[in-house]
Amino acid sequence: MDKPRFETRPVFTVAGPRYYGKNENSEIKQMWDERWPEIESVPDQVDSDVCYGVCITGEEEHGPFTYIAGMEVDSVDELPAELAHIEIPEQTYAVFRTTLPEIGKSYDYIYGEWLPKSGYRRAPGPEFELYPETFDPDNPQSLFDLYVPVVKE
């Protein structure tokens, strides 16, 4: 895996369906597949060509976590009650390019190899996947980015 690029992003909000658990049976993929019409039609989208998968981890390593599959929005006023939203704070991120088949290995590399040797530490806040307009979930070679919040040690 390549070294990351670094990007500072201003505060933004993502809204969409929420999953809570350990994803032991590919529930997140199932949510993307089954609830795509809801994701695609989230009101007040900023850019309808970019999707996000936001991961909010708990205190327990390898424990349950919250995942929101959604779109960036500029308002949650019209958001249906069954959808969740999260405001992601301004943050600097280490950004890693990957594919769906390699996502597990990518996270293993980020947390097991890169981060301990990088001079950075994981900052508080959610990490997220950014799926650009060019991303095709049916193509295993299709690229997207993992954003991990970091601060210099």
Image: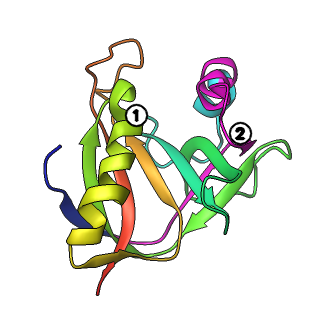
Magenta highlight on residue 112: no
Quadrant containing the C terminus is bottom left
CA gap between label 2 and label 1 equals: 17 Å
Magenta span covers which residues? 9-35
Residue type at mark 2: give it: Pro
Residue 17 got which mark?
2
Determine whether the residue tagged by mark 1 lies in a helix, strand or loop: loop
Which residue in the protein does label 1 denote?
Answer: 49
Residue at 66% x, 69% y is 59
Residue 64 rendering spot, x and y as whole percentages: 71, 51
Magenta run includes residue 15: yes
Q: Residues within 10 Å of mark 2 (few under 14, many from 20)?
A: some
* Residue in the foreground of this view, choosing between 38 and 74: 38
Residue that appears at 62% across and 23% down: 36
Q: Indicate the position of residue 94 as horizontal and vertical percent values.
A: 28, 63
| Location of residue 132 with respect to 127 vertically, above or below | above
Residue 85, image x, y percentages: 68, 55
Tell me the tag on residue 148. Answer: none
SS type, badge 2: loop
State left or right for residue 86 relative to residue 119: right
Q: Residue at x 28, y 27 (%)?
A: 134
State the colouring used for the structure image. rainbow
